[in-house]
């Protein structure tokens, strides 16, 4: 692309006159609008859980889950402070629910995932069914589905929220509705959707009615067993280690139309080769410790830390010991729109 044309007095006069008619010269901004390679205000960043946790617990004394509706500390990308987002297209936050609390029922157009970081005994209710949350569980509250959270247990529970809030905002397509009571009625026993859809079986009359997976909890013990089996085979991808994607069991596709989720085991001593893709990605370290090189930045992570890799940044993972990373991105949305690209020099 050629250099940006230089303004002169004749051109400035023209711009000023057309500006009065809500017109602007494309040639002044073309290079910014259509960059040669992906450009993003998002920067690499890491939130150490041991630093964030005291603030989360302090927020627990500052405001109740009921008053806050959702007591969350938003993980704001340092390159986009004030935008309430961790990448250009994704929102992320750490949510705390204290023993005895309820986060009241509501539904919204935004799809959400919960990845449990700490604590046992809380539940998420989706569409009349509750699931008990355990660390490492990946839970979905689909678009426009009633959901509430509660903690009848004895310990604080914290999870990572991931939502497509910026995407809904971009399309100006947000709707929200609050349930008339704090909790929705429970109409199915816990484990019902797991039995119907999560055992390599489907109901006889199953018809796809939603773009979101019919199971809404992917339990970590099952995920971990799969990774352990792959670890024994030990056929690591040179960039990704042993990486799997969460899938909708009824379609084989992504669990949500806008957000994809992944889990990978990096064997101890793993030295990954470089990789990049156009989906900016949020990672949560589940087990182990290591470091991730993102362009020139080194992010040293350990269990429960969250970090973000911007679009088209060259990423390279290293693990000191066997480590597990959960991650999510807007890959399904980009693929559906024909925008997604990747580059893996290691092939
Ligand atoms: Fe919600």
Image (cartoon, rainbow, N blue to C red):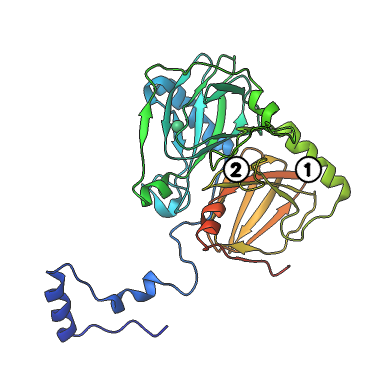
Gap between marks 2 and 1 measured at Cα? 19 Å
Query: Along the line of sight, which residue is nearer the eye, 12 or 296?
Result: 12
Residue in view at x 59 percent, y 62 percent? 277
Residue in view at x 37 percent, y 21 percent? 67
Is residue 64 among what the camera can see?
A: no
Q: Quadrant of ligand 1?
A: top left
Residue 117 placement (x, y as % from top left): 61, 33
In the depicted structure, whether residue 134 falls above or below residue 261: above
For residue 66, which numbered disc appears in the image? none
**The N terminus: image quadrant:** bottom left
Rendering quarter of residue 108: top left
Kindly identify which residue carries mark 1.
227
In the depicted structure, whether residue 127 falls above or below residue 182: below
Q: Provide the secondary structure element on which disc 1 rests.
A: helix
**The C terminus: image quadrant:** bottom right
In the depicted structure, whether residue 234 falls above or below residue 135: below
Residue 50 placement (x, y as % from top left): 58, 35
Label located before the other in sequence (2 or 1): 1
Image side of residue 124 versus residue 234, left or right: left
Residue in view at x 78 percent, y 42 percent? 227
Residue 231 placement (x, y as % from top left): 83, 46
For residue 255, which numbered disc appears in the image? 2
Image side of residue 193 versus residue 96, left or right: right
Image side of residue 37 versus residue 178, left or right: right
In the depicted structure, whether residue 183 falls above or below residue 238: above
Is residue 343 among what the camera can see?
A: yes
Within-10-Å neighbours for mark 1: few <14, some 14–19, many 20+ = many
Within-10-Å neighbours for mark 2: few <14, some 14–19, many 20+ = many
Query: Along the line of sight, which residue is nearer the eye, 346 or 202?
Result: 202
């Amino acid at each position: 692309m050629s250099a940006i044309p230089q303004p002169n007095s004749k051109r400035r006069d023209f711009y000023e006159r057309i500006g009065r008619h809500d017109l602007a010269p494309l040639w002044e901004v073309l290079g910014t609008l259509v960059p040669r390679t992906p450009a993003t205000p998002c920067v690499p960043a890491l939130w150490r859980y041991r630093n964030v946790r005291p603030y989360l617990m302090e927020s627990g004394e500052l405001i109740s889950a009921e008053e806050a509706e959702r007591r969350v500390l938003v993980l704001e990308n340092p390159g986009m402070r004030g935008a309430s987002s961790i990448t250009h297209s994704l929102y992320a936050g750490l949510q705390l629910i204290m023993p005895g609390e309820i986060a009241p029922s509501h539904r919204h157009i935004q799809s959400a995932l919960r990845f449990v970081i700490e604590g046992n005994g809380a539940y998420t209710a989706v569409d009349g069914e509750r699931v008990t949350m355990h660390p490492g569980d990946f839970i979905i509250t689909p678009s426009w589905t009633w959901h509430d959270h509660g903690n009848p247990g004895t310990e604080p529970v914290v999870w990572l929220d991931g939502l497509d809030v910026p995407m809904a905002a971009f399309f100006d397509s947000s709707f929200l509705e609050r349930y008339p009571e704090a909790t929705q009625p429970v109409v199915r026993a816990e484990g019902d959707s797991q039995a119907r859809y999560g055992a390599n079986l489907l109901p006889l009359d199953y018809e796809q009615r939603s773009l979101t997976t019919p199971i809404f909890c992917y339990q970590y013990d099952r995920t971990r067993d799969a990774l352990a089996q792959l670890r024994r085979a030990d056929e690591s991808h040179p960039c990704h280690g042993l990486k799997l994607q969460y899938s909708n069991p009824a379609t084989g596709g992504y669990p949500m139309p806008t957000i994809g989720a992944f889990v990978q085991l990096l064997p101890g001593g793993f030295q990954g080769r470089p990789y990049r893709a156009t989906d900016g990605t949020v990672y949560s370290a589940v087990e182990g410790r290591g470091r991730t090189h993102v362009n020139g930045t080194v992010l040293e992570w350990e269990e429960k830390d969250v970090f973000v890799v911007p679009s088209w940044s060259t990423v390279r993972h290293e693990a000191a010991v066997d480590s597990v990373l959960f991650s999510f991105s807007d890959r399904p949305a980009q693929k559906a729109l024909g925008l997604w690209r990747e580059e893996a020099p290691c092939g």
